[in-house]
Amino acid sequence: MKKLTLSQKAGLLSVGLLAVILLVWQLATLPEAKGVAADVDPEYAALMGGGTSTAASSFPTPAAMAQTVWDKLSDPFYDNGPNDKGIGIQLAYSLARVLGGFVLAAVVAIPLGFAIGNSRVFYQALNPYVQLLKPISPLAWMPLALYTIKDASASAIFVIFICSLWPMLINTAHGVANVRKDWLDVSRTLEVNPLRKAFRVILPAAAPTILTGMRISMGIAWLVIVAAEMLVGGTGIGYFVWNEWNNLSITNVLFAIFMIGVVGMALDSLFGVLSKRVAYQE
Amino acid sequence: MTTPVTHPFLQVENLARAYPSPSGGDAVTVFDHVNFRIHKGEFVCVTGHSGCGKSTILNILAGLDSATTGNVFMDGREVSGPSLDRGVIFQSHALMPWLTVLQNVEFAVKSRWPNWNKQKVREHAMRYIELVGLKGAEHKKPSQLSGGMKQRVGIARAFSIEPKMLLMDEPFGALDALTRGVIQDELLKICAETQQTVFMITHDVDEAILLSDKIMLMSNGPHARIAEIVNNTLPRPRERSAIHKQPHYYPIRNHLVDFLVSRSKQFGALRDAPDAPSSPTVFDPDDLLEPFELTQPESVVVPVPPIGKPHIHLVNA
């Protein structure tokens, strides 16, 4: 028999694991076998909180779930008013907010990180602020944002901005401060002007570290947007989850959780690809 | 090979470097009273034990470091910072790993001549890549090259800016002996072609003899100085395979090795003596030939055990 490669083995194991999960899920969501004696009046049983009407839990079976996923994904962009939008639209709202906050954060964090990484004075002056602000949960800023910005959607973007800022700032500063002295010496002996040095030497040298910071930021932003949208409401995947919870539609909540995972994974692998692009081997 | 001109190309006057002591006491003077001159087209090697400040001197010449006291003049102007006039070859090759071989050299060429167009920069860079025998590898990244090839790129990069002077800090220290030999031969060839003025640090006595016109020997730090200068008059062109058959080869080599083994340590005591010479002793190979034979028996003298002290015999412990 042919030996399986490592990835074939891993693939088989993954599929096996999926089968086990689905099986357990299926077993756990089987309609309760007539828990009530057959001779009891169904109406009475219903009154007592038993009987066939409640036997099917609101937790869907895998088959029902698959049906929902299929239905939702086959028409992702419908819009039937504020409380009934396709998953595509909700995700697009969330992604737009994340992207907005993230880009704003990058615009601030990367130049500032450059300055901090280049100057010990800057580093020491700003370090206490960074250390103080970094551990604050981004959601703690929400009331302040709502009060000052007076716009729910912009407040969500602000929260994303705040949470994306720190990893990018710290990693950029760290990457810039740790550019190998040899490369800086080379550019000094070649009398490279500061701007060219920044873009041709320091930026490429620090790019892997900066991109790691961006990747961490994006991960955190995607975590935070769900919570932020639950608070601000209106649109977005976070709002969708909370709305479906209020509708007691566990199926839709599960579907949303699944989609949050899928999009998060896609974003992370996007940054994985970008990281590979700028990586260099010494 | 070169006719000495009246005013030296590079002049180092009374250079000293002190570092603040880590324990907070008096500053530690690594070297002081360092004086030497290098003429145009000369190849000068410096050797000495680790910690004598060779690399610091090189960095000061490069403008990457500054002296505590003293001055460096090149071509009549004081060296006050890094300059394209002085190319540096780093021991760690210092190539930028995200650029290809060609891009690394082009980066230097473009720094030297910012107004050149792409085509001209590329042609110029390629000429130097060919010079070090790396044609065909120009689109490789440094990580795909062997240590020797990386150092060749470093050499190509340094030569490509056509500096007035080349500074090399143990450029071949990290290479295996075979590769080192090949690259030394290439360097010898390129230097002969370009009449490059070179200041090079090396720990390798044979390398110094093969490449240099003048070998400066530094005593041990702290308070290191240039203790001796050996004029290496072995005829050029030199061949690795034949150089050891030159009559002056072994006297020079022995003189250098003796210095590194013993005299470099003794120099400290000699320096503080009241009649100490204020400038390094200059040796010519002809001087070395005679006294070398004479001093040989002297070193065999066995010190007489001090009288009046009993010899201790360890019989049974």
Image (tube, coloured by chain):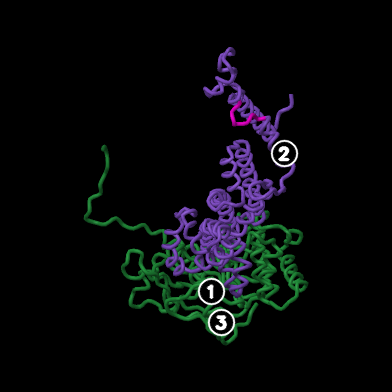
Chain colours: A purple, B green
Q: Residue B74 bears which disc, if any? A: 3
Residue A178 or B244: which is nearer the viewer? A178
What residue sits right under mark 2 in the picture? A71
Which residue is located at x 48 percent, y 81 percent? B71
Structural distance between the alpha carbons of marks 2 and 3: 80 Å
Q: Residues within 10 Å of mark 1 (few under 14, many from 20)?
A: some
Structural distance between the alpha carbons of marks 2 and 1: 94 Å
**Which subunit holds the residue at mark 1?**
B
Q: Are marks 2 and 3 in contact (CB under 8 Å)?
A: no
Whether residue B283 is visible to the viewer of this picture, yes or no, is: yes
Of tags 2 and 1, which is closer to the observer?
Answer: 2
Look at the numbered disc 3 and give the secondary structure of its residue. Answer: strand
For the C terminus of chain B, give its image quadrant. Answer: top left
What residue sits right under mark 1 in the picture? B284
Look at the numbered disc 2 and give the secondary structure of its residue. Answer: helix
Query: What is the three-letter code of the residue carrying label 1?
Result: Asp
- In this picture, which residue range is highlighted in magenta? A56-62
For the N terminus of chain B, give its image quadrant. Answer: bottom right
Residue A72 or A150: which is nearer the viewer? A150
* Residue A104 screen position, x and y as percent: 58, 63
Query: What is the three-letter code of the residue carrying label 3?
Result: Met
Q: Residues within 10 Å of mark 2 (few under 14, many from 20)?
A: few
* Residue B8 screen position, x and y as percent: 56, 83
Q: Is residue A220 above or below residue A23?
A: below
Q: Is residue B249 above or below residue A244?
A: below
